[in-house]
Image (tube, coloured by chain):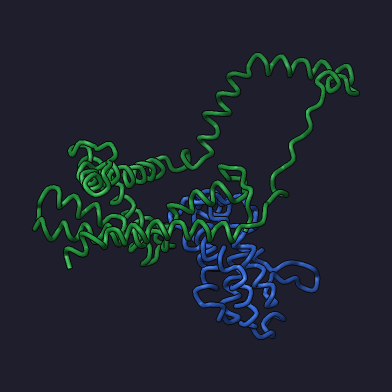
């Protein structure tokens, strides 16, 4: 279906990147208290009928959190799911607020970087139009 | 066994607690060695007021500027009050979630104040270390414990019934809640002697020790990391200068 699906996932490369940023990312993931107070700071959450899938904490838990939980052993389907979370559900406007001080934009940007390294990113068609969900 | 739990284990727990906090602090500063100077915006240089006023302004522009100066001078106190006190409050987390914020503040204040200033705890500190902190009256501490438990119940109900919180809740969250609340429940039961006093007291001491040991290495580590993140990491929401970066 997509050109991106042809490439195999280089889990070693993902693990290497995950290990490099382990200190920061693991600390942020550990100290997220799952309080959901970040929700209202996201305009996408507010404009999507307060759907929890658009909460900043939900996005990091299901992107960076998934990558660390699986220790980088992810397949293309998982990366595609993460792609939707970090591109469709987040525009990286950096307006999210965490009472504890967890930097959500840092984590989303990190997840985007890992997806990009595996050739997973929003695609443009031949006419230059982006994927419909964007 | 009980003697060990009531004696050396208490010191071991405190040792692990303080060493753990120290370790986490050192680890944080180790991970954030680089100074984040580029994120601190440069302050504009102060220029001479007279020069600024006369710099290339048209006649109409001058009148508008004068009117604005007069308006600002006249209404500055009112604008400043609204800007400083009302608008930020509405935009802040306090304005968005007043109940949750209030409960969180009370919960955390009582979480620290109740055990630290409890008379019975201070008696133990005095007998072992020779000094003690000011002690709360037993009835006050009892009231604080009940308020704390009510706040904890609020968090638990929120976690179970509020859709958005449930969506991100894992077993670890319930475990963190249990570790925090258990010493208070057992302490409350021991004070009122509702069950077998000796057993409940032992359970209370074990729960307290478990909490102390786990604080630096689990989610409860936000006790120290809250201050490290909010004061040292450079961001828009930083309380401090934010002079460090990962």
Position of the C terminus of chain A by quadrant:
bottom right
At which x and y percent is residue B56? 91, 23
At which x and y percent is residue B240? 58, 42
Q: In the rendered view, tell whether residue B173 sits above or below residue A115.
A: above
Which residue lies at the image location 55% right of the left edge and 32% below the top edge? B87
At which x and y percent is residue B96? 47, 42
Position of the N terminus of chain A by quadrant:
bottom right
Which residue lies at the image location 27% right of the left edge and 47% below the top edge? B129
With B196 as the anchor, is A100 left or right in this view? right
At which x and y percent is residue B133? 29, 39
Q: Residue B64 occupies which quadrant of the picture?
A: top right
- Chain A shade: blue
Q: Residue B113 occupies which quadrant of the picture?
A: top left
Colour-to-chain, green: B
In the picture as drawn, the residue positioned furthest to the front comes out as B130
Q: In the rendered view, tell whether residue B114 sits above or below residue A87.
A: above
């Amino acid at each position: 279906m997509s050109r991106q699906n042809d490439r195999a996932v280089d889990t070693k490369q993902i693990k290497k990147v995950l290990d490099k940023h382990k200190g920061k990312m693991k600390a942020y993931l550990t100290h997220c208290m799952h309080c959901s107070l970040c929700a209202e700071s996201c305009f996408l959450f507010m404009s999507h009928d307060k759907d929890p899938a658009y909460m900043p904490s939900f996005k990091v838990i299901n992107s960076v959190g998934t990558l660390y939980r699986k220790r980088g052993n992810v397949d293309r389907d998982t990366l595609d799911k993460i792609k939707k979370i970090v591109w469709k559900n987040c525009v990286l406007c950096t307006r999210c607020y965490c009472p504890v001080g967890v930097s959500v934009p840092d984590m989303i940007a990190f997840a985007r970087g890992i997806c990009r390294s595996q050739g997973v990113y929003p695609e443009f068609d031949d006419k230059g139009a982006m994927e419909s969900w964007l | 066994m009980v003697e060990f739990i009531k004696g050396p284990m208490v010191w071991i727990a405190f040792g692990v607690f303080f060493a753990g906090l120290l370790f986490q602090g050192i680890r944080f500063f180790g991970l954030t060695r680089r100074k984040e100077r580029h994120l601190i915006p440069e302050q504009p240089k102060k220029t001479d007021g007279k020069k600024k006023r006369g710099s290339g302004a048209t006649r109409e522009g001058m009148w508008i500027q004068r009117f604005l100066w007069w308006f600002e001078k006249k209404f500055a106190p009112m604008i400043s009050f609204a800007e400083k006190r009302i608008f930020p409050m509405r935009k802040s987390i306090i304005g968005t979630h007043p109940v949750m914020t209030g409960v969180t503040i009370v919960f955390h204040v009582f979480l620290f104040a109740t055990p630290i200033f409890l008379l019975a705890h201070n008696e133990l500190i005095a007998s072992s270390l020779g000094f003690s902190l000011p002690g709360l009256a037993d009835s006050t501490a009892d009231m604080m414990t009940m308020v704390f438990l009510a706040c904890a119940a609020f968090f638990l109900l929120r976690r179970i019934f509020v859709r958005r919180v449930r969506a991100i809740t894992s077993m670890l969250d319930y475990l963190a809640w249990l570790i925090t609340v258990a010493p208070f429940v057992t302490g409350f039961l021991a004070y009122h002697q509702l069950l077998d006093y000796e057993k409940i007291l032992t359970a209370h001491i074990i729960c307290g020790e478990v909490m102390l040991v786990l604080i630096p290495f689990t989610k409860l580590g936000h006790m120290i990391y809250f201050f490290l993140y909010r004061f040292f990491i450079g961001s828009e929401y930083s309380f401090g200068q934010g002079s460090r970066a990962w």
